Image (cartoon, helix red, strand yellow):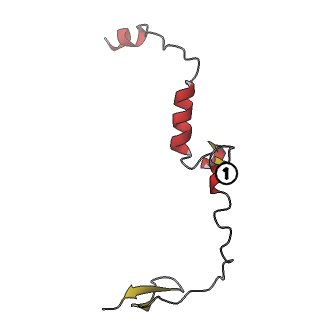
Amino acid sequence: MLAMVATAAWPAEPQRAGASAAAQQAARQFLCPHGGSPSWGGRCRPGSGGEAQLRGWDRGLPPAAHVQAGCPPGTQAEPALGAAAQRCRPLP
């Protein structure tokens, strides 16, 4: 019985010409929600679309000081677990 199943002709899969433009756009938006197009390594290659709105978002901000900032009023400093940093917790 199994031999008959193995030798039976299976219907051929339909040949696809390629994904539609709408399907490609949906995949691109899913994989790269902030714009661009997918590339090797799971990264998104910048495109020419809405990324221009994101560029320069940090203009006018001071450069990073690379030091821990103090805690705001109403909180107290506490050592963070597993790091050489502190976290701020609300006062009890």
Looking at the image, which is closer to me, 33 or 52? 52
Q: Residue furthest front?
A: 60
Q: Say above or below: 26 vs 81.
A: above
Quick one: quadrant of the N terminus? top left
Q: Residue at x 48, y 14 (%)?
A: 13
Q: Residue at x 68, y 48 (%)?
A: 46
Residue that carries the numbered disc 1 in the rendered image = 52
Q: Say above or below: 88 vs 31.
A: below
Task: Write down the quadrant of residue 2 in the picture.
Answer: top left
Q: Alpha-carbon neighbours of circle 1 within 10 Å: few (<14), some, or many (≥20)?
A: few
**Where residue 38 sits: x, y (%)?**
62, 43
Task: Write down the quadrant of residue 37 in the picture.
Answer: top right
As shown in the figure, which amino acid type bears the numbered disc 1?
Ala
Looking at the image, which is closer to me, 90 or 1? 90
**Where residue 81 sits: x, y (%)?**
45, 83
Q: Say above or below: 31 vs 64.
A: above
Looking at the image, which is closer to me, 34 or 13? 34
* Secondary structure found at label 1: helix
Q: Residue at x 57, y 26 (%)?
A: 21
Q: Say above or below: 42 vs 74.
A: above
For the image shown, how many numbered marks are present on the structure? 1
Quick one: quadrant of the C terminus? bottom left
Q: Residue at x 53, y 86 (%)?
A: 85
**Where residue 69 sits: x, y (%)?**
56, 87
**Where residue 86 sits: x, y (%)?**
49, 87
